[in-house]
Amino acid sequence: HDRGVIDTIVEIVAHTDGPIFEVGAGDGELTAPLQRLGRPLTAIEIDARRAARLDKRTAVTTRVVDADFLHYRLPLAEHVIVGNLPFHLTTAMLRRILHGPGWTHAVLLV
């Protein structure tokens, strides 16, 4: 994973406000730096094993959720969406985000 890309994403997110929802947290390459922003963070990961491993390595202020983002209920309150969208699901995920409630910013890598 490119550290420069991760740093850029975190820098962009730092200029936003509100809770962060990370789509496809995986092994936490982006989760760990996002935690350092000191904001509520929910890391959504579809793979139960990866979610369990990530949950053991995250701060208590980070909530790791084992769920399919396409079916995950996003909050009505304002939030920021961050993630590296998988190519084969990009269209479906973008539709889900664009039609979802509450988000103020989306920082996405495709």
Image (cartoon, helix red, strand yellow):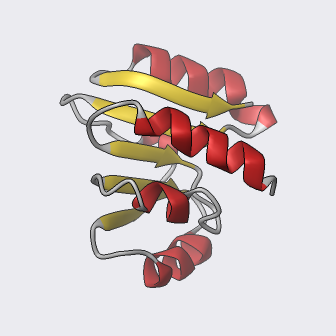
Residue 21 lies in what quarter of the image?
top left
**Residue nearer the viewer, 15 or 104:** 15
Say above or below: 92 vs 25: above
Q: Is residue 93 left or right of residue 90?
A: left
Q: Position of residue 28 (x, y in %)?
A: 59, 65
Say above or below: 29 vs 89: below
Q: Position of residue 46 (x, y in %)?
A: 56, 57
Q: Quadrant of the C terminus?
A: top right
The residue located at (32%, 39%) in the rendering is 73
Q: Is residue 63 left or right of residue 7?
A: left
The residue located at (65%, 62%) in the rendering is 29
The residue located at (64%, 69%) in the rendering is 27
Residue 105 lies in what quarter of the image?
top left
Extreme residue in the left direction: 77
Residue 104 visible to the viewer: yes
Q: Position of residue 30 (x, y in %)?
A: 59, 56
**Residue nearer the viewer, 29 or 74:** 29
**Residue nearer the viewer, 99 or 62:** 62
Q: Position of residue 82 (x, y in %)?
A: 52, 39
Residue 70 visible to the viewer: no
